Every structure is written in C-alpha cells, then in structure tokens.
C-alpha cells in the first residue's frame, strides 16, 4: 500500500483561546488536520499543532521523500522524513508536520491490520483512563463558573492554566487556588499550569518554590510550566525542593530534546505533545525513556479530537499512565467525529478498541463548519 497524497486541512471557526497575552480569536488557525491517502482507497488522519500554511509548506518540502512510500511503516517513514529534512527542520514547523503525518500513518496501519493502534504500539495495559478537563484561570467569579461547568460535564480532574495566575501577586494567586478548591471540593483533583512558556516570563526558582509550597496546602496534583521552558537548571533545582510534582515538556520536539530532562531528573512528570514532537513514534520512545527513569508521562493535549485519540492509544500502551489532557469545551474535540468521546459517570474515558485510532471523522460537518478552505 503506497502513499498517494497528503491533504492539509486548516481548522478555523472554533479555536479556543490559549491564554497568551494577545489572545486567540475563533477564526485563528492554530490546528491543522492532515489526511494521508493511499493507492488502495484507505486513509489515515493526523493532527498538527501549528497553522495550515506552515504545514502546507512543510508537506511540499517533504513530498518528494513521502511520495509512493509505504503507508504501513509509520516509524521508518517518519524517521526518514526527520533525518532527510535535518538542515531545514530539526524541530519547529517541519517536525510539527511530520508529527501529523506520523499519527495518520499509525491510524492507517491500525486500519490495515484491523487492530487498535495501542496493540500495535505494544499492547494494552488498560481499557480506560481519567481525562483532566483543561481550562484557563480567570477572575475568581468567572473561574468559579468555569469550574462548575467543567464538573457538570463529568470531569473528576481539572487543570487550570495561564492568565491571571502568576501575573499579579502571591495573594491573588492564593485567592484563585482557594476559590478553586472551595468550588470543587476535596473530591476533584486539581492541577495548576503557570504557563511559563509565555513570552517574557518573569519568574524564577524562588517564586516557583514558594508558589509550590502554597499549592501543596491545597492538595494540587502537579505544578506545570513554573519556569521558562529552556531553564533546565532551574527545573532541576525546583524538582528537588518542591513539595508537589513538577511537570513540563510540551514545547520540546524530537526525542533527543527530552533526553537531558529525563536523564538529569529535571521533572517529575514529562509532557510530550504528539501533534508537534514527532508523532506517536516519538512519543512512544519518550514515554518508555520516562518509564525507564521512573518519571511519569502525561501527554500534553491542547489540540483536536485526533490528538486526543492518539493520546488515548499511547496511554493504553504504557505500563503506567494516569491521565490524558482534554481541552474543554472545544468544538475541535467534541464536534468533529460521528461519535464523540464521552466522560463516564466515574470521570473516565473508554479507550477505543476499533481499528486505527478509533474514531470516524464527520466529513460533512468538518467541511461545512471548520475547514478553513471552505
């Protein structure tokens, strides 16, 4: 089975604000789908956490290497693309495009074999996993409303991130955390994402250490992106002294970039994003490296239903996996498939066992509502 075409589909119309200072409008294109098509009529779906124009440019660059390649050898093909585009990529938008192609090839591989991707990744350690609803911080009254709505959607774990946490003063930060805990009670797990990858992040280890002690008083599960993403020395020190687990890794691409973070124990939780770090092939390698270093892996998942589906398959295939991220509410997750994922009464998601990634895209809805080319 040979690859004949890669369709690039920028998403627009329902883009969720990511918390950056300039904000994000629904019409902005931050996520792009790719559909890898074959000479036998089957296709696979992938997702890239980058804009359509960048993905289209990268696919044009990669196409001479991809044309007529095997559609059922995802690891070899994606590694070929990575190695052969070394001088024009080695991360960034080229790697983001490779990520989507790789996910699509795993989807195809599963469909051809009649197996869920998790089984092809090595086997199933679990049938379901807890999603945490991923939301933004806000002013206390609005935060309370957002938390109540997230609990009403069935989530038993919630991560709050970015503005205005860490942008005013310590007293206000504690007000936000206290408001959150009071709102959801002791039975809901809470995580905190400071958003240290925001441009010109002003805080260092001292702020992060003191904030971590405050978070521990409220039973926070982990403290994410407390420092700028390149401050590995700061993370090593913070992880050593923090009373709550420290998490980061969403901006890293390629497995080699993750190695020093794992080997030097710079984090308690590493967070690869399959839609930009190289796809499921790279995420599997990263996850096993983390396991071998006794570091927890939790996929970063601020993306689409395809990204969530990939995260679910990876979580099924890892010996230890406790959570997947679920951006909510998000039309690109909840409104793109024939049958949406549903959180059960215990706050878990069933991991699909149907061939491929385990979903069916609603092509008509995608074309009419969210395809930027329409």
Image (spheres, rainbow, N blue to C red):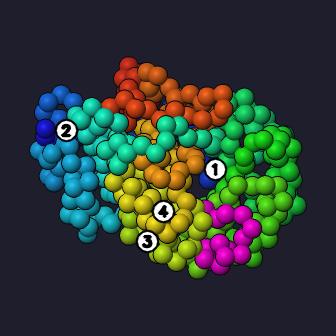
Of 70 and 110, nearer the camera is 110
Dot 1 falls on a residue whose secondary structure is: loop
The quarter holding residue 34 reads top left
Image side of residue 366 versus residue 65, left or right: right
Q: Is residue 36 above or below residue 269?
A: above
The x and y percentages for residue 18 are 59, 47
Q: CA distance from mark 2 to mark 3?
A: 34 Å
Kindly indicate whether the residue at mark 2 contacts the one at mark 1 (C-beta within 8 angstroms): no
Q: Image point 18% across, 28% down: which residue?
A: 41
Q: Image point 17% across, 49% down: which residue?
A: 66
| Magenta-drawn segment | 234-249
**Which of the two discs, 4 and 1, labels the residue nearer the N terminus?**
1
**Which of the two discs, 2 and 4, labels the residue nearer the N terminus?**
2
Please name the residue that numbered disc 4 is placed on: 291
Please name the residue that numbered disc 2 is placed on: 5
Does the segment drawn in magenta span residue 40?
no
Please name the residue that numbered disc 1 is placed on: 19
**Which of the two discs, 4 and 3, labels the residue nearer the N terminus?**
3
């Amino acid at each position: 089975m040979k690859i004949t075409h890669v369709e690039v589909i920028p998403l627009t119309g329902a883009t969720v604000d990511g918390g950056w200072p300039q904000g994000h409008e629904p019409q902005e294109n931050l996520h792009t789908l790719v559909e890898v098509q074959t000479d036998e009529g089957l296709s696979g779906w992938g997702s890239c956490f980058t804009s359509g124009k960048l993905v289209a440019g990268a696919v044009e660059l990669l196409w001479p290497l991809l044309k007529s390649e095997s559609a059922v050898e995802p690891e070899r093909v994606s590694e070929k693309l990575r190695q052969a585009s070394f001088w024009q990529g080695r991360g960034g938008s080229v790697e983001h495009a490779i990520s989507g192609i790789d996910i699509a090839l795993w989807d195809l591989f599963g469909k051809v074999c009649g197996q869920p991707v998790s089984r092809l990744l090595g086997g199933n350690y679990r049938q379901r996993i807890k999603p945490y609803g991923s939301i933004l911080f806000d002013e206390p009254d609005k935060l309370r409303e957002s938390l109540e709505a997230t609990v009403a959607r069935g989530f038993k774990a919630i991560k709050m991130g970015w503005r205005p946490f860490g942008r005013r003063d310590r007293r206000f930060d504690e007000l936000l955390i206290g408001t959150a805990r009071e709102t959801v009670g002791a039975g809901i797990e809470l995580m905190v994402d400071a958003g240290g990858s925001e441009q010109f992040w002003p805080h260092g280890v001292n702020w992060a250490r003191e904030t971590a002690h405050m978070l521990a008083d409220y039973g926070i599960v982990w403290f994410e992106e407390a420092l700028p993403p390149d401050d590995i020395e700061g993370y090593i020190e913070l992880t050593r002294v923090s009373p709550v687990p420290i998490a980061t890794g969403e901006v890293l691409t390629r497995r080699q970039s993750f190695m020093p973070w794992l080997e030097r124990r710079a984090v308690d939780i590493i967070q690869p994003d399959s839609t930009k770090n190289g796809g499921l092939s790279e995420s599997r390698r990263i996850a096993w490296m983390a396991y071998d270093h006794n570091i927890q892996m939790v996929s970063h998942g601020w993306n689409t239903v395809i990204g969530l589906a990939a995260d679910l398959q990876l979580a099924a295939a890892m010996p230890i996996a406790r959570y997947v991220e679920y951006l909510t509410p998000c039309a690109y997750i909840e409104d793109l498939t024939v049958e949406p994922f549903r959180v059960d009464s215990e706050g878990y998601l069933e991991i699909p066992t149907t061939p491929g990634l385990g979903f069916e895209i609603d092509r008509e809805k995608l074309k009419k509502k969210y395809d930027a080319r329409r």
